[in-house]
Image: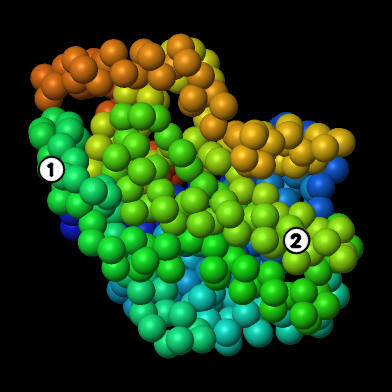
Amino acid sequence: MIIEPRMRGFICLTAHPKGAEQSVKNQIEYVKSKGKIDGAKKVLVIGASTGFGLASRITSAFGSDAATIGVFFEKPPMEGKTASPGWYNSAAFEAEAHKAGLYAKSINGDAFSNEVKDQTIELIKKDLGQVDLIIYSLASPVRTNPVTGITHRSVLKPIGSTFSNKTVDFHTGKVSEISIEPSKEDDIENTVAVMGGEDWAMWMEAMKKAGVLAPGAVTVAYSYIGPSLTEPVYRKGTIGRAKDHLEATAFSITDSLKDIDGKAYVSVNKALVTQASSAIPVIPLYISLLYKVMKEEGVHEGTIEQIQRLYQQRLYAGGEVPTDEKGRIRIDDWEMRDDIQQKVAELWEKATTENLSEIGDLEGYRKDFYNLFGFDIKGVDYNADANEMVAVESIKE
C-alpha cells in the first residue's frame, strides 16, 4: 500500500515502516560514528520504542555491544492498517541488532502492569541472568495502578492561576494567545500517579526481589526542567509536580539498592519534538525558536545525539557521574546556557504568525514531528508500495 501521513490534531494516525527503518539505521550509524562506549552489557529499556527510550536502546546496543530487552506498548499492524510508529522502530532495531550478532528481544504490553513486570523478569532470568542498566522512559497519559486497580489520567495544567501566553499551531504556523485554566487538587494527584516515580520504584523493587539486578546496577529515568517561559505550564504545573516526585524517587531507589551498590539517577534532557510535547501549549513555539538559536550556535542535538552524549560523557566517562546540586544529571546544559536562553526570550517577544518562519525554525519542528512517524526521511521513496505487515522478530503475536 502507499502510506501517507494522516493527521488528526496533534496526532499522526499512520506510520511508515520504511521510514522508521531508515530512521533507526541513521541513529545506529550516528552512534557507531562516535566510537565505542565502555558501558553496560545487559540492558533493560522500559519504554524502548520511541524517543529517548529508543535512542537509549540503540546507544546501548551499538555503542557498547549490549544485549537489550525492550518493553513497550505499541499497536501491531493489520491488513491495510499501519502499526504505531514504535512498532516499526522496534522491528527495525531488532533486525539490525540481530544482523550485528547482538541479543535483542522485546515485550509488547502495559509496562505499568504486574504481568508485564513478571514476564520481563522471567525473560531476564532465562536469557541474561541479570541486567546492569535499567532505563525508565515511559511516556503515557494514563496508568492503572496494579495494586489499587485505580486508573489515573494525567493533565497538563498550571497550578493556582490561569496561564496565558503565546502558542503556535505548527501545522499552519499561526501564532495565537492561549489561556489554560488551573488544575484542581485531584489533577495534581492523578498526574503524579501517572508520570511520577511510583511505577519506576515498583519495577526496581520487583527486579531486586527477583535477583535480576547485577551488583552495581544503575537505573536512569528521564526528566525535563526548561526555561522560565514554560514554567507555569510545565515545571511549576501539574507535570512539574510529577517530575519532582520522579526526581525524589531516585534517592529512595538508591537507598534501596545500597546492598548491591546500585544507583538511581534522573537525567534532565533538552526540549525535543515528541508526540507528547507537540500537544503541550506554548512548547512548540518555544522549541521552534530554541532550534533556530541552537542550530545557529552549532549546539543543536536530536534525541540520539543527546543520549549518545549522556552515555559517553556522563554515565560512562569514568569516575563519578557528574550531577547538579539536586543530584540530577544535566544533559540540558547547552539548551540552558544563558546566552541561548536570552536569545530565545528576545525572539519570543517578537514572534508573530508573519515572522515566525524567519525568526524560528518551524520547518525543522515540522520535519522532526513527521520523522517521529517515519515520514519525511531522506532516502525513502514514499511513492512506492510499502508492506505494512512488518513483524518484530522476537514477538509472537
Residue indicated by mark 1: 179
Amino acid type at mark 2: Asp
In the picture, measured across the screen, residue 339 lies left or right of residue 155, that is right
Image position, residue 115 (x, y; %): 58, 87
Give the Cα distance between marks 2 and 1. Answer: 42 Å
Q: Residue at x 31, y 29 (%)?
A: 229
* Circle 1: element type: strand
| Residue 258, numbered circle | none
Please report the residue visible at 81 percent of the width from the left and 53 percent of the height from the top: 40
Q: Is residue 315 visible?
A: yes
| Looking at the image, residue 137 lies above or below residue 256 | above
Residue flagged by tag 1: what amino acid is it?
Ser
- Residue 199 to residue 237: above or below: below
- Side of 87 relative to 252 (left or right): left
**Residue at 46%, 39% in the rendered image:** 225
Camera-near label (2 vs 1) is 2
Residue 350, given in percent of the width and then of the height, sits at 19, 15
Q: Is residue 212 left or right of residue 70?
A: right
Q: Across the whole image, how many numbered discs are drawn on residues?
A: 2
Q: How would you rate the neighbour count of disc 2 (Cα within 10 Å): few for under 14, some for 14-19, many for 20 or more?
A: some
Q: Which percent across, then down, holds residue 11?
A: 26, 56
Front-most of 290 and 377? Answer: 290
**Nearest the camera: 280 or 86?**
280
**Quadrant housing the N terminus:** bottom left
Residue at mark 2 = 255
Q: What's the residue at 31%, 18% (across, down)?
A: 345
32 vs 318, nearest the viewer? 318
Instruction: Give the answer, above or below, for where 30 lies relative to 213.
Output: above
The quarter holding residue 71 reads bottom right
Q: Position of residue 384 (x, y in %)?
A: 36, 53
Mark 2 falls on what kind of element?
helix
